[in-house]
Image (spheres, rainbow, N blue to C red):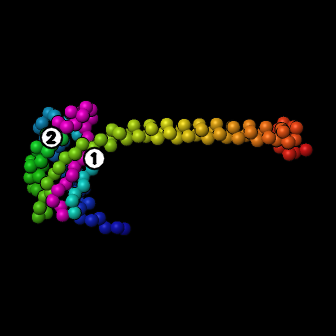
Amino acid sequence: MLAMSRDLKVADFIRDEVARIIQMEMRDPRVVFVSVNDVKVSKDLSFADIYVSSLQATEVNDQRELIEVLNKAAGFFRSTLAKRHSMRTTPKPRFHYDALVESGPKLEALIAHAVASNQGLENDAGEDSAEASLNAETEVTGVEGDHGQT
């Protein structure tokens, strides 16, 4: 089994704790229904890029406001995190809106549509080639659908 690197362990810890802090300790009414999707910690553990999404922030302006609020509260998050671990330093949180959560279903629909249209083209091509071979056989043998069997 592969050992997890330190930055991955710290990222997992930060993801779990930031989610708890947002859920239990944030009092700002603009920060509701927020999910912490991913955390990437720099190799030197100085920064933590935290990717969040919200069911309530459907408009771009709402998403920007959410990120602004969270980034303004970065000091609160950092000091709270520092109290919950025994590392020498605590990474500085930087919040980003994770649009992948919303674009995922759209991408899946586009892929499904592309696959369906591709299969439709293959079926059309298959029918066209079967019809062409039948026509060619009719021309050669003069019998439709014989397929060389007598």
Q: Is residue 48 magenta?
A: yes
Q: Name the amino acid type tagged 1.
A: Asn
Residue displayed at 12% across by 48% down: 74
Q: CA distance from mark 1 to mark 2?
A: 17 Å
Instruction: Let me know if residue 109 is in the magenta part.
Output: no
Magenta stretch, residue numbers = 44-66
Does dot 2 land on a helix, a strand or a loop?
helix
Q: Position of residue 39 (x, y in %)?
A: 24, 52
Are discs 1 and 2 less than 8 Å apart at CB? Answer: no
Q: Nearer the viewer, residue 66 or 25?
A: 66
Q: Residue at x 76, y 41 (%)?
A: 133
Quadrant in the picture for residue 110: top left
Of pointers 1 and 2, the one earlier in the residue sequence: 1
Q: Is residue 50 left or right of residue 69?
A: right
Q: Which of 137/103 is in front?
A: 137
The numbered disc on residue 12 is none
Disc marking residue 68? 2
Quarter in which the N terminus is drawn: bottom left
Q: Amino acid at mark 2?
A: Glu
Return the residue found at the far right.
150
The residue indicated by pointer 1 is: 37
Secondary structure of the residue carrying tag 1 is strand
